[in-house]
Amino acid sequence: MAKRISFTVIGSGCSTASPDPMCRLRPDPCCPPCKDAFANPLTSRNVRGNTSAAIRIEHDDGAEPDTIVIDCGKTFRESALHLFAREDIRKITLVITHAHIDAFGGLDDTRPWISSSAGVQDHIDVYCTRLTHDGIKKTFYWLFDDPSKPKSTNHLPKFRWHIMPDDEDWKVCGITLSPFQFHHAKHGTQTTLCTAFLIDHSVLYASDVFYIPKTEWTGLREKLREKLTLPTRDGQYTSSRPRLQVAILDATSVFAFYTPHFSVGQAIATARRLGALRTIFTGIPHGYSHATWEAWCRAFAQHHAAVSSTPEEGPKGMPDLWWDWREQERRAVETTNGERDWSERSFFKHAMESVRLWESEEALRQQKGGPARLHGIDTRPAHDGMTFSWTSLQPTHHPHDARAEGLEPHRGH
Ligand SMILES: [Zn+2]
Ligand SMILES: [Zn+2]
């Protein structure tokens, strides 16, 4: 039975969220997006919460829709106050991607949901991997039943924990979430994994990633191939199946390559290799304004195919994983952070440098020796409250049936 599913970006910012308190603290004038966010806190698209999303599933039988909230970070409370009413979100089920405080710090603020006077729900189901569960337990130990201690009489949230497999599909609220464990941060020698999800074979959501291990990359492509078509190495499509509709990818690092997060060029290269029709950047830090991100995305869609590109010569014998982090020195694009130049001109310059670096990786991968261009990708920055929807993919779907509504393509795509 076809299901109607909608996706809302609850938070599109990084761990410090936006505006960044640093722009209140330092003496010189703050960056353009923080200035706008301070002046227009309720309407500015430069106000961004910690990365989070809501998936709303409508049922055919008229039952109350289900809402899966992915991540419940430090800004959960504000996001709930501003966006949940607008989206008519009441009963929630939580999915947590990883054990960082900007992904689970709001768990304690879910108490109103289980309050008898609210009458919404008597517990909250929480789905995550064992690694994430154990990390949360170390921080919020009082949220977990400990049989050796007397029960707390305090008013606590009531969770039902579902510890889910790392590499098998999760069924949550009637839809399939296919999990992939991407590398996110490093603490000493330990790597923090963050669960990315292929949602209903329609949307890839990877909010925190700097490196995709080969096993996960292979697994993701196999999972996509079950229902969708993937591009060949030189970007051709040989099947009439639908393509991946939307890839929502981490771009917190903006242009630089370093361990916690993807950069703009890296996100675009990843989306291209997966054949995603649309790429949405999330985890956006303060610095460049939403309008500047949008202007560059429009220009990229319309003009990049015509821009001549001369990728630099890369090292020979590169592994197939072209974002191998040992190569990070070569991929670091000089950023403007030191100069605090947040102009559109500076964004365009550095974004194109970032794209060209990743084009050089594509050229290596295709072994053509010539330029490879990451054109034809419809990109856009996320903003809090961004919404799109789709009908759950059916085996009989023609490619044109499977389209995400609410995301009009840029001209030039
Ligand atoms: Zn700022
Ligand atoms: Zn994190």
Image (cartoon, rainbow, N blue to C red):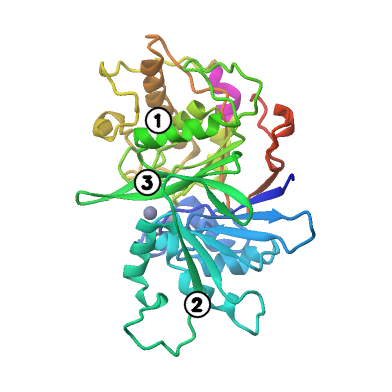
Q: CA distance from mark 3 to mark 2?
A: 43 Å
Q: Nearer the viewer, mark 1 or mark 2?
A: 2
Residue at the left extreme of this rendering: 188
Left or right, residue 60 beside residue 185: right
Residue at the top extreme of this rendering: 369
Answer few, some or many: residues within 10 Å of disc 3's Cα (few below 14, many 20 plus, some between 14 and 19).
Answer: few
Q: Which residues are magenta?
A: 299-305
Q: Nearer the viewer, mark 1 or mark 3?
A: 1
Q: CA distance from mark 1 to mark 2?
A: 44 Å
Relative to 140, say whether 197 is above or below. above
- Identify residue type, mark 2: Pro
Tell whether circle 1 marks a residue whose Cβ is less than 8 angstroms from ligand 1: no
Relative to 366, say whether 48 is above or below. below
Mark 3 secondary-structure assignment: loop
Relative to 327, say whether 41 is above or below. below
Q: Position of residue 344 (x, y in %)?
A: 50, 38
Q: Position of residue 241 (x, y in %)?
A: 65, 25
Q: Which residue is mark 3?
A: 340
> Which residue: 37% across, 12% down?
367
Q: Which residue is mark 1?
A: 354
The answer to which quarter of the image holds residue 238 is: top right
Query: What main secondary structure does the magenta stretch of the protein show?
Result: helix
Q: Which residue is mark 2?
A: 157
Answer few, some or many: residues within 10 Å of disc 1's Cα (few below 14, many 20 plus, some between 14 and 19).
Answer: many
Question: Which quarter holds ligand 1?
Answer: bottom left
Q: Position of residue 243 (x, y in %)?
A: 61, 29
Tell whether circle 2 marks a residue whose Cβ is less than 8 angstroms from ligand 2: no
